[in-house]
Amino acid sequence: MLVGNYPTQRIRSVVRRGLVTALEMKIQGRFRSLETMAIFGCYVLPAGILIAATQLPIWEDVSVRAGLNFRNEASHTSRKYLPETMGGGVAMLDYDGDGNVDIFLVNGAKILDPMPKGHAPDKSDPRFWNRLFRNNGNGTFTDVTQQAGLKGNGYSMGVAVADFDNDGLPDLYVTGVGQNTLYRNNGNGSFTDVTSTAGVAGAGWSTGALFIDYDRDGLLDLFVSRYMTWSFAQDLFCGTIKPGGRAYCHPDQFQPISHLLFHNEGHGRFHDVSKESGIADFPGKGLGVAMNDYDRDGWPDIIVANDSVPEQLFHNLQNGHFEEVGISSGMAYDEDGNSFAGMGVDFADYDNDGWPDIFIDSLAKQKYALFHNRGGTFEYVSAPAGIAVNSVAHSGWGAKFIDYDNDGLRDLFIGQSHVMDNIQLSQPDLRYLEPPLLLRNLTNRFLDVSSISGTALRQAIAARGVAFGDINNDGFVDVVINTNDGPAVLLKNGGSTNHWFVVNTIGTKSNRDGIGAQLYLVTQDGKQQYAIVSTASSYLSASDKRVYFGLGSCSTVQLLEVRWPSGLLQSFHELHSDRIFTVRESDNPH
Ligand SMILES: [Ca+2]
Ligand SMILES: [Ca+2]
Ligand SMILES: [Ca+2]
Ligand SMILES: [Ca+2]
């Protein structure tokens, strides 16, 4: 079985190379001609012989063993202040550059019940601090919050990660209710709050944030979504007047608010271009954010998952301006033309056709949205893709397309929980706590494999932010979940025999992280994959910036192309699998 649209000559050449691989395996020397063979991935076998399906990975909850002793303190009150149920985010990043992915968890702050006029949430008690855990490289983590100076202030919501000053060290931007903070990584284990000199404090209730070089000048800019015009003073009563009946208010009770865009001017300073870029013309009720180039014009575009108003796609007009094209591109509503409670989001190519697709999760009874990109416009395909039937009873938050079994098709991992902790009172068929959902990609159709992937995926939790990265560098992506008012959950991916390839980009003319670089990979069986370098997606969270590719049974990457934001194209041929491949942007591409 051959996949891809390669010329016959090229297929023959690929097959010959595949045969070499096969000969190195158990079936050495038994075949004389290609006509008698079939190709399964990169295995070459006599026609008619089937190989057993690779064992699917099993997930294990290693939170306790790893020492990830974090508990999110949401400060739930009887007043049901909305921020209490919306946090928080989590990041996976290698802050100390030792090659091991570290974990940053966002926390709430003390809210009084009721909150007196003029008071703000108080983070001074250590149980409310945001926390940084260093990966010791031996399966354990150490809390290094105090040395790092990252305890934070106020009621925190989300986190974005990137090397905004191009010094080779990842920096942190933490969003919150009323204030955001930019931390510059000093390179000695500590961070400095540079918010005021950078001019990126923002205002209002900020949620998702991402770094993007939207004008491709080599400096990463900052986009921040905001949720609603909300304050403790707007103490509306929602729900029913009976004991325990008060509920979190629907977003319809509050006005939308514009998102923020900060242009990186260099020398540690940003300029608020929300108005002049056109972003401020399109208010929303923003939560998760992601970036990719949906129309393949070489300029990165931005998605905002909005809660109960149309979803937004900001098309980069290449001149510093954006136009909002959610409705005209077909990603604003579900198939019935209804808006939904957009929360977590990812913007990636799940069907390997080169066009980045969109996933946005939502509340129970709305169905999670999968938008297939058909050459620059989107088609809502949740039902035919099997997403609708597997999500109609669930509520999703942090989510991402990850190829968890490294078979070459990106699967979907979704953290779940209803937004109302007392949802069972009004809707007895729903639950507040839910296990995560793992949907395996079977090419244009997704299958729920949660129940066969280990007991760790059957624990009911109040998932919110979810971050993705490989904590033990075995090539299989692991997951960390920040739960609302509960313990963080670290899920280790048990892996399989499939091969993998990880790309780490280092820009020189482009931004040093290589964020926005477009990757194109072809395995020796002719299968193609596409990806963009970005830390953003999911819900209020940031994932490892390295790009993970599953290769299935292929042990060689035939071709890797990296198209940098600077416009430079670099190509690499015949690369061995099962390694982290660092690509440095070169002045002399070969
Ligand atoms: Ca590290
Ligand atoms: Ca574009
Ligand atoms: Ca696609
Ligand atoms: Ca897969």
Image (spheres, rainbow, N blue to C red):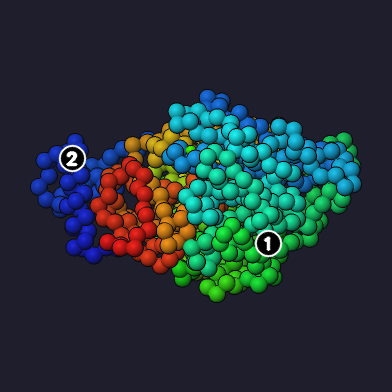
Does the image show residue 316? Answer: yes
**Mark 1 belongs to which amino acid?**
His
- Asked if 202 appears above or below 426 in the picture, the reply is below
The residue at 58%/40% (across/down) is: 190
Which disc, if any, is residue 259?
A: 1
Residue 233 picture location, percent across and down: 87, 50
The answer to whether 477 appears left or right of 322 in the picture is left
Does the image show residue 352? Answer: no
Instruction: Give the mark, 1 or 2, whose residue is nearer the N terminus.
Output: 2
**For numbered disc 2, what is the local secondary structure?**
helix
Mark 1–mark 2 Cα distance, whole angstroms, equals 55 Å
Mark 1, Cα crowd under 10 Å, few <14 / some 14-19 / many 20+, is many
Residue 81 picture location, percent across and down: 80, 45
Q: Nearer the viewer, residue 414 or 97?
A: 97
**For numbered disc 1, what is the local secondary structure?**
loop
Residue 192 picture location, percent across and down: 62, 45
The residue at 37%/54% (across/down) is: 584
Q: Which residue is mark 2?
A: 24
The residue at 63%/71% (across/down) is: 277
**Mark 2 belongs to which amino acid?**
Glu
